[in-house]
Image (cartoon, rainbow, N blue to C red):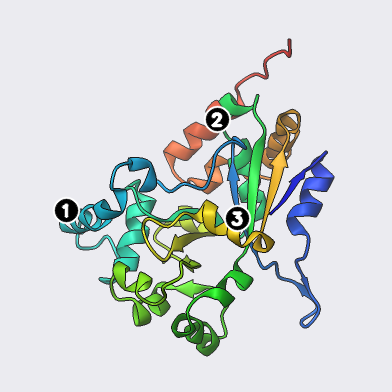
Amino acid sequence: MREIRVSGWEELNERLYEGSFREEIGRNRSPFVYRGMSDVAQNLTTTLCRLGGKYGEMEPHLLRNFRKYATRTAVPWDSPWNWLAVAQHHGLPTRLLDWTYSPLVAMHFATADLESFGSDGVIWMVDFVRAHRLVPQKLRAHLEEEGSDVFTVEMLDRSARELEDLGDLSQEEFLLFFEPPSLDDRIVNQFALFSVMSTASASLDAWLEAHAELARKIVVPAELKWEIRDKLDQANVTERVLFPGLDGLAQWLRRYYTPRQRER
């Protein structure tokens, strides 16, 4: 896997948009999705995995009870993939990870936590187009039929009506990305999508190590975080926009008006 430590704002943008131009259409359409994290030491472990113990066995129980107690209007229609997306959105431990199509949104999440400004951040990039060439043929056929590069809930429903059905499609572990329904403005504004492994116990970190050509790890030095943060604020890439509502407004104002500490 390529690990690139950038030296400035210009190089960061260059690296994040690298490879986005598509000759066949003459347009910039990046095949990458992005995930920004405040500390480079963090890995791509899911919230389900962080439960510990036999976490894979807990997934159906968590989702069953979430479906049982949630309101009937929580999802557009009854699908395990809709329920999984809603559950992730509201903080239930799941096998999903949040990603974005937007390099700027990924920069935000790499620089949003002021308490982590003493540590290097990281932006993960994964080529989802090439990753989807490795999914089982039954799933690839849906992409080809739709002329799409990414899955929707409707496509997944056709091949995997239950979560365990996904792992039954192949003896080898695989990774896919799907777009959730536009549940609220937060998902829309963050240009969000989710990654999901074929089984609850599969490790994305391990999968990417085995398919290193599909990923890049952009290290954001701690000393660059203030410059990046200030420029994102000027570009209106803030909590106020990404988390619409009073909570996001308060988060933005608290961070924006926190003074920069003198360097010792």
Left-right relation of 145 to 14: left
Query: Residue reaching furthest top?
Result: 264
Discs 2/3, front: 3
Chain-order first, disc 1 or disc 2: 1
Q: Are marks 1 and 3 in contact (CB under 8 Å)?
A: no
**Is residue 242 visible in this depiction of the protein?**
yes
Label of residue 108 in the image = none
Q: Residue at x 46, y 46 (%)?
A: 45
Comparing 245 with 94, the one in front is 94
Q: Amino acid at mark 1?
A: Tyr
**Is residue 190 visible in this depiction of the protein?**
no
Label of residue 69 in the image = 1
Left-right relation of 1 to 187: right
Q: Residue at x 38, y 47 (%)?
A: 49
Q: In the rendered image, which residue does mark 2 sit on?
A: 253
Q: Amino acid at mark 2?
A: Leu
Label of residue 209 in the image = 3
Q: Secondary structure at mark 3?
A: helix
Chain-order first, disc 2 or disc 3: 3
